[in-house]
Image (cartoon, rainbow, N blue to C red):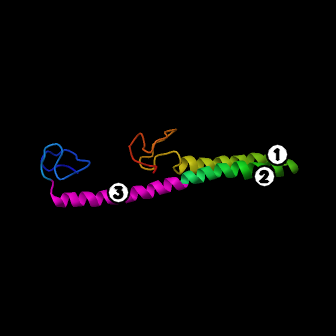
């Protein structure tokens, strides 16, 4: 919100503007608090969705290593189908890329920027909290 007197942007309004000391009207504070709670609810939904896709990407890695690759190797080599292990490997890689990169496993759910190997709770680009 912006101060009505000095027009500076206030990120955490109290009863007075931190820059000029002007009293902030109660209606403005109430609307700010309502908007902030709505944004926090939306952020919680985004973080929950991000966690879901992150878990799916980890699950695709585990399923690929423990199920798809051994199964396609066994069936392919036993029956002389040399292309089958490559197909299994390709499907596994595509599932990991889909859940891990395209759907948001390594991207910020708020700004879409690549997170790379950042280990923090906040996006280094937009400073939004994407992990609890």
Q: Earlier in the sequence, mark 2 or mark 3?
A: 3
Is-magenta flag for residue 37?
Answer: yes
Position of 67 with respect to 58 (left or right) is right
Q: Earlier in the sequence, mark 1 or mark 2?
A: 2
Tell whether position 61 is magenta.
no
Rendering coords of residue 115 (x, y %): 48, 41
The magenta-colored residue range is 24-52
Please tell me whether mark 3 or mark 1 is closer to you in this view: 3
Residue at 18% across, 61% down: 27
- The crowd level at tag 3 (other Cα within 10 Å; few <14, some 14-19, many 20+) is few
Residue 85 position within the rendered picture, expressed as x and y whole percent measured from the top left: 77, 47
Residue assigned mark 3: 39
Q: Characterize the magenta stretch by its predominant secondary structure.
A: helix
Spatial CA span between label 1 and label 2: 13 Å
Left or right, 31 with respect to 38, comes to left
Mark 1: few/some/many CA within 10 Å (<14, 14-19, 20+): some
Query: Horizontally, is 65 left or right of 31 in the view?
Result: right
Q: In the shown orientation, is residue 21 left or right of residue 54? A: left
Depth check: give the residue in front, 104 or 130.
Answer: 130
Q: CA distance from mark 2 to mark 3?
A: 46 Å
Q: How many marks?
A: 3
Who's the residue at 69% across and 52% down the image? 63
Residue shown at the point (40%, 40%) measured from the top left: 125
Q: Which residue is mark 1?
A: 82
Given this view, does label 1 or label 2 mark the residue nearer the observer? 2
What is the x, y in percent for residue 128?
Answer: 39, 47
Which label number is shown at residue 71? 2
- Disc nearer the start of the sequence (3/1): 3
Residue 127: mark in rendering:
none
Please name whichever residue, 115 or 12, is drawn nearer the observer in this view of the structure.
12
């Amino acid at each position: 919100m912006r101060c009505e007197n000095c027009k500076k942007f206030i990120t955490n309004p109290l009863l007075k503007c931190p820059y000029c000391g002007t009293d902030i009207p109660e209606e403005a504070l109430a609307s700010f608090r309502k908007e902030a709670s709505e944004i926090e609810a939306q952020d919680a939904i985004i973080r929950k969705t991000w966690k879901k896709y992150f878990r799916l990407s980890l699950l695709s890695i585990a399923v690929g290593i423990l199920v798809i690759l051994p199964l396609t190797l066994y069936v392919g080599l036993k029956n002389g189908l040399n292309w089958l292990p490559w197909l299994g490997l390709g499907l596994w890689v595509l599932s990991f890329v889909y859940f891990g990169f395209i759907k948001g496993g390594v991207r910020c759910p708020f700004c879409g920027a690549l997170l790379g190997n950042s280990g923090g709770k906040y996006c280094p680009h937009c400073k939004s909290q994407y992990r609890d």
